[in-house]
Image (spheres, rainbow, N blue to C red):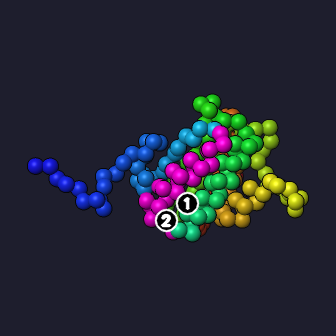
Amino acid sequence: MSETIPTDEQPDEVDKYGGIPGQGLVRTARIPFGADASAEARQVVVTDLIARGIDESIIDEAELVLSELVANSVRHASPLPDGTIRVHWKARNGVVELEVSDGGGPTQPSVRRPAPWAPSGRGLRIVRSLAHEWGILEDRGTMSVWAALGGPSRRRVN
């Protein structure tokens, strides 16, 4: 006789990125490079963070920071060789670390002071204001910008 699963206890389902929301120490998703990348990245990361029971205020901050990192990647960089950007995240003890990697661009990401009337140029200022740590890593043609939210992190830039 087969066992019936109550509706509030559905079996874990693997998402289209090969992971189960809320499980595993870290997650990575390769998001197609383009205009829809930010929305797709937010959806997969927020779903995972909710499943992990992360505080709602940290999830809100992570969603905003992720939006800025992905938007900067799509606007100022090139995709990775497979036509994607890589979104990597982990959550532990209420701390969320996000990382967005791309193929790099003509300049290195930096915090700028835009003119008050400028329509853009505030993304990394927003990241810096919300993250307790953030940084940039370059490795073999890949540029990664990361941010930690929700408390102290052991990750440091040398």
Magenta-span inclusion, residue 46: yes
The amino acid type found where label 1 is placed reads Val
- Looking at the picture, tell me which residue is in the foreground, 133 or 85: 85
Q: Position of residue 72 (x, y in %)?
A: 72, 48
Name which residue lies at 78% across and 44% down: 108
**Where residue 54 is drawn, which disc sits there?**
2
- Looking at the picture, tell me which residue is in the foreground, 148 or 67: 67
Q: Is residue 7 above or below residue 73?
A: below
Determine if residue 14 is in view. Answer: yes
Name which residue lies at 31% across and 55% down: 10
Secondary structure under tag 2 reads loop
Residue extent of the magenta highlight: 34-55
Report if the CB atoms under discs 1 and 2 are less than 8 Å apart.
yes
Q: Is residue 69 left or right of residue 86?
A: right
The number of callouts visible is: 2
Q: Position of residue 74 (x, y in %)?
A: 69, 42
Mark 1: give few (<14), some (14-19) or many (20+) Cα within 10 Å.
many
Q: Is residue 32 above or below residue 89?
A: above
Q: Nearer the viewer, mark 1 or mark 2?
A: 2
Q: Is residue 67 left or right of residue 50?
A: right
The amino acid type found where label 2 is placed reads Ile
Determine if residue 145 is in view. Answer: no
Q: Position of residue 26 (x, y in %)?
A: 48, 51
- Looking at the picture, tell me which residue is in the foreground, 87 or 47: 47
Name which residue lies at 59% across and 31% down: 82
Q: Where is residue 129, by image quadrant?
A: bottom right
Q: Earlier in the sequence, mark 1 or mark 2?
A: 2
Magenta-span inclusion, residue 27: no
Name which residue lies at 68% across and 57% down: 134
Q: Main secondary structure of the magenta part?
A: helix
Q: Which residue is mark 1?
A: 96
